[in-house]
Amino acid sequence: MTPALIGVDWGTTNLRAWALDGAGGVLAEATSAQGIGALAGEGFAQVLRDLVGGWTDGGVPIVLGGMIGSRQGWHEAPYLACPARVETLAASALTLDTGVGRGWIVPGLSCRAETGIIDVMRGEEVQLCGLALEDGVAVLPGTHSKWVVVRRGEIVGFRTFMTGELFAVLKAHSILGRLMQEGEPDLDAFATGVARALADPALTALLFSVRSEGLFDRLPAASLADYLSGLLTGTEIAANAVHRDAPTTIVGSGPLAARYALALERAGFPAPRIVDGVTAATRGLHLIARQLPGALA
């Protein structure tokens, strides 16, 4: 196997790499638990060599995205201010000798809202490139969900919502979690939470209803976590009601993507397109590589 490109998504907790052919097809993939958080600022070259060294004799270009370009990563790739597109991300990529071939680190993105608040992303910009959107809104659910506006092929702005992290904190470290029990997923409880948040997105008031629903046995203990998830997801979507008429793409897979699709439709958004996150990442890495001088023939 001789790949045309090695693409890498190097996050805080995990590392994923793909051997890609000239058209961006996946020839092989490899994963590691050696995210940047486990490396304490050193040892990156050896970890990469151990993971992908068998794919290259040193002549295969390597494009890296994610937290590897952060201040705690291998080399810091400064944030690129929006608007941005594939070409500008490639033009701002940081070159480096990876030890197993010439490499480029894709920069993250920043944007400033009208309120003056600055938002940032690292890694999601690669997936956004892989969507090849012309116009619309991309939703990337997760620990820190992103809502991204694309116009004429450019990423013009985005907002981050700490929905996933807030769910985890409230479930594990607040009074709300004390009545919760593990059980089968309850989509009806999730949908109830979404509907209540859409009707009245006063989050701090809504959150206490998780406890009262349990105290008065209006919801089973095993359904309270799904209800909480619905409240948080619905509040996130309510904050983005301005995009209700825009074509919407969800980047993700599995139950989380399905739940966001359900919540969006309950909020009156058009039925969203769903694109698997790995597919978006590999496509994005390939499209960026095509714009890098000397990366792909």
Image (spheres, rainbow, N blue to C red):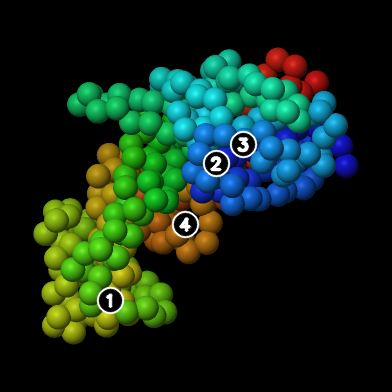
Give the residue at mark 2: 39
Q: Secondary structure at mark 4?
A: helix
| Amino acid type, mark 2 | Leu
Q: Residue at x 69, y 37 (%)?
A: 46
Give the distance between the C-alpha atoms of the residues marked 1 and 4, in whole angstroms. 23 Å
Other residues around mark 2 within 10 Å, as few (<14) / some (14–19) / many (≥20):
some
Nearer the observer: mark 1 or 4; the answer is 1
Q: Tell me: residue 227, above or below residue 137.
A: below
Amino acid, disc 3: Gly
Q: The disc labelled 1 sits on which kind of residue?
A: Met
Whichever of callouts 3 and 4 sits on the residue coming sooner in the sequence is 3
Quadrant for the C terminus, please.
Answer: top right
Q: Position of residue 237 (x, y in %)?
A: 30, 49
Q: Quadrant of the N terminus?
A: top right
Residue drawn at 86 percent across, 37 percent down: 2
Question: Cβ–Cβ below 8 Å for labels 1 and 4?
Answer: no
Side of 22 where 273 appears, left or right:
left
Task: Quickly name the residue at label 3.
Answer: 43
Asked which secondary structure carries label 2, the reply is loop
Quarter-wise, where is residue 282 in the image?
Answer: top right
Sequence-wise first label, 1 or 4 = 1
Find the distance from the CA under tag 3 to the CA under tag 4. 35 Å
Q: Which residue position holds label 1? A: 180
Q: Residues within 10 Å of mark 1 (few under 14, many from 20)?
A: many
Q: Is residue 16 above or below residue 205?
A: above
Q: CA distance from mark 3 to mark 2?
A: 6 Å
Q: Nearer the viewer, mark 1 or mark 3?
A: 3
Q: Secondary structure at mark 1?
A: loop
Q: Are marks 3 and 2 in contact (CB under 8 Å)?
A: yes
Give the left or right position of residue 164, taking residue 274 as reference. Answer: left
| Tag of residue 257 | 4
Q: Quadrant of residue 219?
A: bottom left
